[in-house]
Amino acid sequence: MNIKAVARRAGVSTATVSRTINGSDKVTPKTAERVRRAVEALQFYPDTNARSLGSGRSSLYGLIISDITNPFFPELVKSFEDISVEHGQEVLVANTNYDPARMESCVTRMMQRKVDGVAIMTSEMEDRLIKVFSHRNIPLVFMDVGAPGPGVSRVRVDHAAGVAMAMDHLVELGHSKIAFISGPLGLFSARTRFEAFLQSLERHGLQRDPALIQEANHRADGGHEAMLRILNSGAKPTAVVASNDLTAIGAMGAIHERGLRIPEEISIVGYDDIQLSAYTQPSLTTLRLPRIEIATAAFRALYKSLQSQTKKPQIGEDYDVQPTLILRRSTGPANRSHR
Amino acid sequence: MNIKAVARRAGVSTATVSRTINGSDKVTPKTAERVRRAVEALQFYPDTNARSLGSGRSSLYGLIISDITNPFFPELVKSFEDISVEHGQEVLVANTNYDPARMESCVTRMMQRKVDGVAIMTSEMEDRLIKVFSHRNIPLVFMDVGAPGPGVSRVRVDHAAGVAMAMDHLVELGHSKIAFISGPLGLFSARTRFEAFLQSLERHGLQRDPALIQEANHRADGGHEAMLRILNSGAKPTAVVASNDLTAIGAMGAIHERGLRIPEEISIVGYDDIQLSAYTQPSLTTLRLPRIEIATAAFRALYKSLQSQTKKPQIGEDYDVQPTLILRRSTGPANRSHR
DNA sequence: TTATTTATTTAGAACGTTTAAGTACACAAC
DNA sequence: GTTGTGTACTTAAACGTTCTAAATAAATAA
């Protein structure tokens, strides 16, 4: 069931079959038709392995994410996959589980499959591993981190603007005691948001209260615990900004447990806009990270390098993406009478 | 940067390098060490394509799911991937988006990559496409649907028992007007749960009220709308069973909007136990589908066929998996005084 | 008609592995 | 010292494509 069998049946050479399959115009419509019929009759599926061995191109992009279980990623993966498949590329997804050792094995797998490019959507990546790719002229695109260079692009989300929008919104509503639940500060993405929070605080002339700032793990359980710590501290925030939606959802649980009402007594803002944010009680005001745009930009960055035939890698670009504030019911005016 | 270069550097033949890489015992520790050093020095990554072309094995399993965006799947994918990687197999994930045309392309991609087996975790699959695999002796494992046959296994979740547990729980709490929000009845998985609901109804001697039965789409928005339809109908259920958690979460939103309290005025039970169910307000009583067990069973089914060296495919088995009822705060005693 | 160009098609050498079959060598048994 | 028996290694033929260079056929020009 290989190309030879098809060639024999169609009465042509394997080269002609190959060209037909690949849509080359150097083949008569008549022969092409004959070949197609043979392919159909034999249920022939060309072997991808042999294909990329022969051609040097794998038609495969690597997509490295932290954890498919984090609701931020599935939509990103889906969008990236959709647009890739549309352009005849496939996608190999790899989870690092936030673990550097797994990252290493992901990189290894990518190399072994001879991927045409890699989108790295985790915020952490060792320089040493980046070199593995760039040394082999494999185009890369990062999210947020790194800087464009030869063969390296970046999709840059304006987190500072995002957090600023959330803060402006809260300040406008009259809030001044605003808590922040960060992600793991070892993660670049979490750090960026935290720093943006501090800047906003300063910009609005608000004081920084350590009791109102808690580090969590970007998961619901962490948000829950962090919120309890804040409430237990005695500091009475009228609003909370969380580093992602899961954290916010966990925090909401803690707030409910304490018998506080959202948003009457305490407002909360998330970050990401995962699907479920619209269905929490109350629905969650949050910053939407446009995953479709991010995925599209990442794909474009890689595809561009693929199309430029030159061996020498071009200097990558920055693709800028803006978050948007999604107003829902978890934020409301600061009500001093409750405090 | 190929095996020849490594062989030259280590002063051995390519065969020896190959054997070293594959951990054959037919190579002296001394030479193995020399080879390993050469591999290290040259940063050699063996080409997977060439490998599977040479060996006939791809070390790749296909995993077909409906939609990675459905929170049921990510954990399943992750578990399947983890156990596969542990056993030296990789995983190629494909989304069908519930679309038969995409299913076709998924199957094609699997064939082209010469996968060693396919786990089909969607409930719908055309016979014609199944034949594509079985015709080539590729082991298959299905979830819920189909029946074991040559090279075909099945992971069977006891949905009837699951729904029965939910119903028993509600009846015990004194509920008798129990609504049901089903998934798309075109889907086998949704139909099974619906039928189990009807059976439970009968078993408990409860009447079947069409107004209390609504079809939705297994997503939050559908659950929301379906719940509104039920509430608008005038029939006043004291409890609702939803076909999955997303549906339940959407329904909870509708219930809240109507100013009804959960569980005092209306109880609700979900199905799946997605991560967020623990963080809804109130937390959701639901049936846990053990995704890790399902993934493990699916992997085992495929791995078994891989290990048996015989060409003839063996008859597959059934792997039975039980759901468990997770009691949280969305269910409580039926309180007639409210009605 | 023949020469020239152009459009198809073919033969066959890559591509980078694996692996059966073969070779060389050490050691044991006779 | 021959013969046998392993063991460690090498040679070279697959595997199924792609793709270059060469061959052929067809079309056009002279």
Image: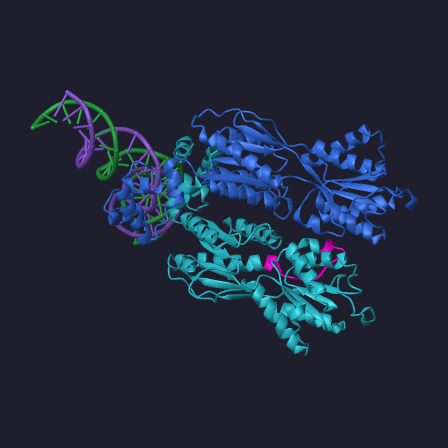
Chain colours: A blue, B cyan, C green, D purple
Evaluate whether residue A138 shows in this view: no
Is D26 or A222 nearer to us in this picture?
D26
Is A22 or C7 nearer to us in this picture?
C7
- Is residue C18 left or right of A77 when viewed as pictured? left
Residue D2 percent location from the top left of the image? 24, 46
| Residue C3 in the image: above or below residue B34 | above
Residue B31 percent location from the top left of the image? 44, 38
Of the 4 image quadrants, the one containing the C terminus of chain A is top right
| Residue A259 in the image: above or below residue D11 | below
| Residue D18 in the image: above or below residue B223 | above
What is the quadrant of residue C4 in the picture? top left
Residue shown at 61%/29% (left/top)? A146
What is the quadrant of residue C6 in the picture? top left
What range of the chain is rendered magenta? B278-293
Residue shown at 62%/73% (left/top)? B198
Residue A216 percent location from the top left of the image? 75, 42
Q: Residue furthest front?
A: B233
Residue B337 within the segment the image draws in magenta: no
Is B310 or B242 nearer to us in this picture?
B242
Q: Residue furthest bottom?
A: B205
Residue A20 percent location from the top left of the image? 32, 42
Is B43 or B72 nearer to us in this picture?
B72
| Residue A46 in the image: above or below residue B261 | above
